[in-house]
Amino acid sequence: MGWRIHLVDNPSARLLRLLVLLQARSRWSGRELAGRLEVSVRTLRYDIDKLRQLGYPVLSGTGAAGGYELQPGPVLPPLLLDDDEAVAMAIGLQLAAGAGGDLGEPASTALAKLHQLLPRRLYGRITALRRYTASVPHGSSIVELAVVTFLTSACRCHQRVRFVYTSRDGAISRRDVEPYRVLQLDGRWYLVAFDPQRDDWRSFRLDRLQVSKPAGARFSPRTPPEPAALLDSIDAAFRRHRATVVVAAAAEIVASRLPTSVPVETVDPGHCRVFATGDTAYSAAMNLLLLDQEFVVENTSPAVRAALQTISQRAAQAGTPPQPPA
């Protein structure tokens, strides 16, 4: 009851609460907002006017489809985030800062500003995310935020994690591992951990595991292999199909159309060599077609050659006009 009186009697707190509600949903009716704030409709209109004076463009309407809606304005107003939203923003800014390029510097400054305003209760989660996650450029993946924060926290606290894992071929196994890092590579999230049952370091795709909470017993950290070796183990699985081709175009022209992770070397002013990869034979073949230039295959697997032939046949058939019925 004391909170209700405090909120009604404190106009500044009420304005912040109103702003949180407007940002949480695209449209509110006046009765809904007044009920949430436990104020009269007249007081609500007064608070809406105060937000407009502060630069927040709040659109109002009448009738059955009326209500209040926070609109985009000429300047970016302050945003109010809940705990999970703040952690998610920190993840995104960290990945953008690590990727470099045009977004690297503004992402770093935005991340520094965010850390200055974070509540202390989030420091542990954010610190774990910054220390125990890493990214490789051109990666973007959608995973549950709760899974990422749980695993990074286990990395920080040196606690074992248990999960059910589905391998590439569909085999299901139960794992109890010592987590080390959470990595992002070419659009996928991975957990790098030491598996005591197999006495070796392993990597697991986050979208293929179902974690069991809470985290398990603590363990003494082991000396991990070199970062390059950890990435190579993941890279070998993701890029298992390879093809080396000579492209009839200058290296700078071809390289401008490809991610920086794809090696391109100059053969002569009008030709270059490209080392394409893919997690399947068809994806490797499709990546070659994306070069949009004539090319000759120097070296690849029979599976990739078969995929190129199949794609060529299907393309030829698709371009043939349909025959009239007999």
Image (cartoon, grey):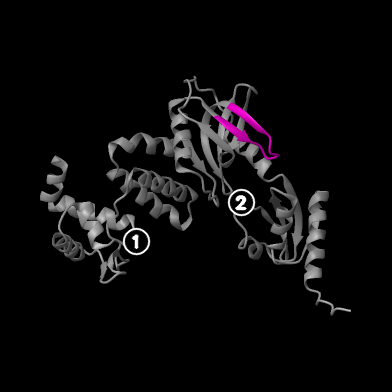
Q: Mark 1 against mark 2, which lies toward the viewer?
A: 1
Does the stretch in magenta take in 259?
no
In terms of sequence position, does the residue under pointer 1 or pointer 2 come before the other? Answer: 1
Which of these two is toward me, 63 or 73? 63
Mark 1 neighbour density, 10 Å: few (under 14) some (14–19) many (20 or more) = few
Task: Give percent across and percent down for residue 105.
Answer: 40, 53
Where is 139 relative to 179, above or below? below
Rendered position, 216 above or below 96: above
Amino acid type of disc 2? Ser
* Nearer to me, 105 or 325: 325
- Where's residue 214, x and y in %? 45, 27
160 horizontally vs 26: left or right? right
The residue range painted magenta reads 163-175
The answer to whether one can see residue 108 in this image is yes
User: Closest to the observer: 92 or 253?
Assistant: 92
Q: Find disc 2 in the rendering and name its residue.
A: 261
**Proximity of marks 1 and 2: CB atoms separated by less than 8 Å:** no
Q: Is residue 298 visible?
A: no
Picture coordinates of residue 89, whole percent (x, y): 39, 48
User: Badge 1 is on which residue?
Assistant: 26
Look at the image and tell me in which quarter the C terminus lies: bottom right
Residue lying furthest front in this view? 64
